[in-house]
Image (cartoon, rainbow, N blue to C red):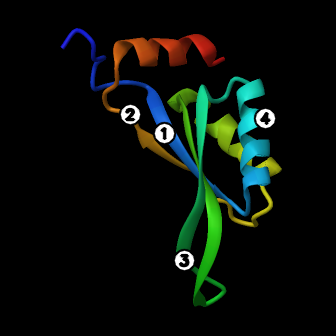
Amino acid sequence: MANVMSTNTNFIIVLVTTANKAEAEKIAQALLKEKLIACANIINPVTSFFHWSGKIDKAEECLVVMKSRMDLFAELAERVKGLHSYVVPEVLALPIVEGSKAYLGWMEEVLK
């Protein structure tokens, strides 16, 4: 398994939903410029169901899947909140437990 890094990586996947593709692109571009993320994928559209204002709601949104490091999450989350149109934006971090050594090495190179 020489091509796989340790299961104790410091890398994360960050999920953010947005109202539309333009907002998703604006957030992704800003975070890339600031080297808070290495990469972003935009999935458009996604159908979201959620509780809001005492009822179950539904919306067509974009899902932004971003790759970063855990130590950058607090700053990344603050930037998303500042750029986002939602009152309560989704900003969730999931651990990357394994990955190819080459890809994780590239991420380390391009992040601040």
Crowding at label 4, few (<14), some or many (≥20) Cα neighbours within 10 Å?
A: some
Residue 86 falls left or right of residue 58: right
Residue 107 falls left or right of residue 53: left
Mark drawn on residue 30: 4
Given contact means CB atoms under 8 Å apart, are the residues at marks 1 and 2 in contact?
yes
User: Residue placed at 78% from the left, 35% from the top?
Assistant: 30
User: Residue placed at 56% from the left, 28% from the top?
Assistant: 71
Q: Amino acid at mark 3?
A: Phe
Report x, y in % for residue 68: 55, 30
The residue under label 1 is 13
Q: Earlier in the sequence, mark 2 or mark 3?
A: 3
User: Tag 2, which secondary structure?
Assistant: loop
Q: Earlier in the sequence, mark 3 or mark 4?
A: 4
Given contact means CB atoms under 8 Å apart, are the residues at marks 4 and 2 in contact?
no
Q: Earlier in the sequence, mark 1 or mark 2?
A: 1
The residue under label 2 is 96
User: Residue placed at 36% from the left, 13% from the top?
Assistant: 101
Given contact means CB atoms under 8 Å apart, are the residues at marks 3 and 4 in contact?
no
Mark drawn on residue 5: none
Which quadrant of the structure image shows residue 58?
A: bottom right
User: Residue placed at 81% from the left, 49% from the top?
Assistant: 82
The residue under label 3 is 50
Is the N terminus in the top left, top right, bottom left or bottom right quadrant?
A: top left
Residue 12 falls left or right of residue 40: left
Decide if residue 90 is in sight here.
Answer: no
Crowding at label 3, few (<14), some or many (≥20) Cα neighbours within 10 Å?
A: few
Report x, y in % for residue 10: 43, 25
